[in-house]
Structures are given as structure tokens and as C-alpha cells.
Image (tube, rainbow, N blue to C red):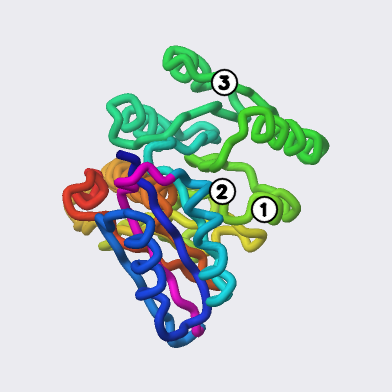
């Protein structure tokens, strides 16, 4: 019995939930989990439904059958098979904590993705990646060759059929053109000290100012540097008794957890873009994400 999901986004109107649930019932489907949200501020409605096709209905049949409902409510509607893993490219520079965390979660099955490539502008993690039987691409980036380097990156994206690119502390700024082309398909992670502590050694700057909370933010990448729609955030409390090195260690741990949760939400279709914000539906009870992925 196949398990599918349906994502719906449309203007707020009466009867949407009834239309969706009624259609699935008529198709012999059983709803396992459902979440919806009306945003009165934007006038947008969002819904995600997970269901089993008990009568063997395929995705194409469901899509074509649902088309009149989507047209009636002016919906963006997307059906997908929850068993199909998204193809993901990881990009990294010289900080490897998020890369190593993702590789571990992927290896044990806690993050159900297909890692099709790792791209870096340095050779530091080539051995680690190759030992996981994952293709490694070192693409050097300078001011002079940036357009050519991004063209190489996009070639890897196209050749692998990647659904998502994740910046696991990749320290190069992507061009506006690449951000537009990959809109909603690139996720970044960074500490939450911005804009207070910019540049080198932000954790050292935070330590010297006596910061009491360390956090991390994961967001979609846009042309506005580090200002894309936020998917996931978290914080940890620190005290005067901890050193600058403790700040770094704790900060990296928070970054890794927040990043993994954001990716987990995206690959399961639980994140909707809502202007400059996101709607993120919680994971269904019992799922690995509901345990905060610690």
C-alpha cells in the first residue's frame, strides 16, 4: 500500500478541506495525517495531507483527478510519494561539523535523502566524502572565476538531477542569478549573531560581549544575504563560567541540529513559502523529527 502526500496552497476560501478530504475518500484513500493553516494577514491557505492509497491509485491518476478541484480553488497542488528520497547536494568549505552530522544521520537512516554529490571550494573533506562512496567535486572560487565556478556547480546540479542544495557552512556568497534560478531549493545555516557580530570569529566576539544565548538559523537562500525565509531556529544558554572555546563547541552543535531539522522538514514537504516567511507544519507523532533530532 503506497503512502503519498498532497501539498496545497491557495487563497483562503470556504470548503477547501471538505473538497480535499472528499476527493481522497472517493479515490479509496485513507488520510493518516493532516495539517492546515489560514494566514489571515496574507489571505493564503496552506495544507499538507499524508494518506494511503488503499485501492492502488497511482500519482498520475490522483493528479489528473484532482485537477478540477485545483482549478476551482486556484490551487498550487502537488502530490508526491513519501517513499521517494530527494536528491541532495551538500556544499561545504572548511568547517565540517554540519557536513559530518549530515553524513552520520544519512548513514543511519535518520535523514532519508540521497546524497548525490558534495561540492567544496577546498580539498579538506575529500577523503571523508569519498569514503562514504559519494562523488566529491572541488570547485575553486575566486573573484575572477566566480561565474565559471557557479556554472560548474549548476552543471553538477543538472547532471545529478538534484532536488535540493544545502550549504553546510559553505563560505562563498552565491550570485543573485543562481539564487533566483534555485529559489526555494537552497538551504543555508548560520549562527544567530547576525547582524551584531559579523566577520571573523563571531563566537569570540560574542564571548567578549558576555552573550548569554547562542543560537542558529536555517533559511532558504535568496539574493538578500542571510535574509531568506527562515525554516528553523534554536538557542542554547551559556554562562560566564564558559570559555570562548565552549561557545564555539556549543554553537556548532546547535547549528548542526537546526540544519538537520530544517532539511528534514523540507524533504517531507512540510515547509511552504509564504512571502518572506514560511509555514512549517510539525512532523506527525512518532516521527524522528518530532524528537528534535538531537
Label 2 neighbour load within 10 Å: few <14, some 14-19, many 20+: many
Query: Which residue is at the front of the view, 189 or 182?
Result: 182
Judge from the rendering whether residue 54 lies leftward or rightward of residue 231; answer left or right.
left
Span colored in magenta? 43-57
Assess whether residue 283 is covered by the magenta stretch. no
| Residue at which label 3 appears | 136
Give the left or right position of residue 248, taking residue 132 as reference.
left
Point out residue 136 in the picture as x, y percentages from the top left corner: 57, 20
Q: Which residue is mark 1?
A: 179
Whether 52 is among the magenta residues is yes
- Residue at image mark 2: 186
Q: Residue at x 67, y 53 (%)?
A: 179
Quarter of the image for residue 30 reads: bottom left
Dots 1, 3 in contact, CB < 8 A = no
- Residue 200 at x, y percent in the picture: 52, 48
The image shows residue 14 at horizontal and vertical percentages of: 42, 85
Q: Residue at x 34, y 67 (%)?
A: 21
- Looking at the rendering, in which quadrant would you find the N terminus? top left
Disc 2 to disc 1: CB gap under 8 Å: yes
Q: Secondary structure at mark 1?
A: helix
Q: Earlier in the sequence, mark 2 or mark 3?
A: 3
Q: Label 3's element?
A: strand
The tag earlier along the polypeptide, 1 or 3, is: 3
**Quadrant of the frame with the C terminus:** top left
Amino acid at each position: 500500500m503506497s503512502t503519498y502526500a498532497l501539498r496545497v496552497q491557495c487563497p483562503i476560501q470556504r470548503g477547501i478541506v471538505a473538497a480535499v478530504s472528499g476527493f481522497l475518500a472517493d479515490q479509496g484513500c485513507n488520510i493518516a495525517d493532516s495539517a492546515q493553516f489560514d494566514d489571515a494577514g496574507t489571505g493564503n491557505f496552506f495544507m499538507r495531507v499524508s494518506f494511503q492509497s488503499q485501492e492502488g491509485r497511482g500519482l498520475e491518476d490522483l493528479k489528473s483527478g484532482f485537477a478540477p478541484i485545483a482549478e476551482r480553488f486556484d490551487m498550487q497542488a502537488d502530490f508526491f510519494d513519501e517513499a521517494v528520497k530527494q536528491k541532495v547536494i551538500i556544499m561545504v568549505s572548511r568547517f565540517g561539523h554540519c557536513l559530518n552530522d549530515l553524513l552520520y544521520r544519512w548513514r543511519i537512516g535518520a535523514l532519508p535523502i540521497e546524497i548525490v554529490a558534495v561540492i567544496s571550494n577546498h580539498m579538506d573533506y575529500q577523503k571523508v566524502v569519498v569514503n562514504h562512496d559519494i562523488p566529491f567535486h572541488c570547485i575553486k572560487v575566486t573573484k575572477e572565476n566566480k561565474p565559471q565556478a557557479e556554472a560548474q556547480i549548476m552543471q553538477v546540479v543538472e547532471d545529478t538531477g538534484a532536488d535540493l542544495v544545502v550549504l553546510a557552512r559553505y563560505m562563498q556568497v552565491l550570485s543573485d542569478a543562481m539564487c533566483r534560478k534555485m529559489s526555494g531549493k537552497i538551504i543555508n545555516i548560520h549562527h544567530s549573531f547576525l547582524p551584531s557580530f559579523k566577520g571573523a570569529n563571531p563566537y569570540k566576539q560574542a564571548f567578549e560581549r558576555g552573550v548569554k544565548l547562542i543560537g542558529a538559523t536555517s533559511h532558504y537562500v535568496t539574493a538578500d544575504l542571510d535574509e531568506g525565509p527562515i525554516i528553523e531556529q534554536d538557542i542554547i544558554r551559556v554562562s560566564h563560567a564558559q570559555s570562548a572555546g565552549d561557545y564555539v563547541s556549543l554553537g556548532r552543535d546547535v547549528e548542526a541540529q537546526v540544519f538537520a531539522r530544517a532539511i528534514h522538514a523540507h524533504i517531507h514537504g512540510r515547509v511552504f513559502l509564504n512571502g518572506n516567511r514560511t509555514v512549517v507544519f510539525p512532523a506527525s507523532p512518532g516521527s524522528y523529527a518530532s524528537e528534535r533530532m538531537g
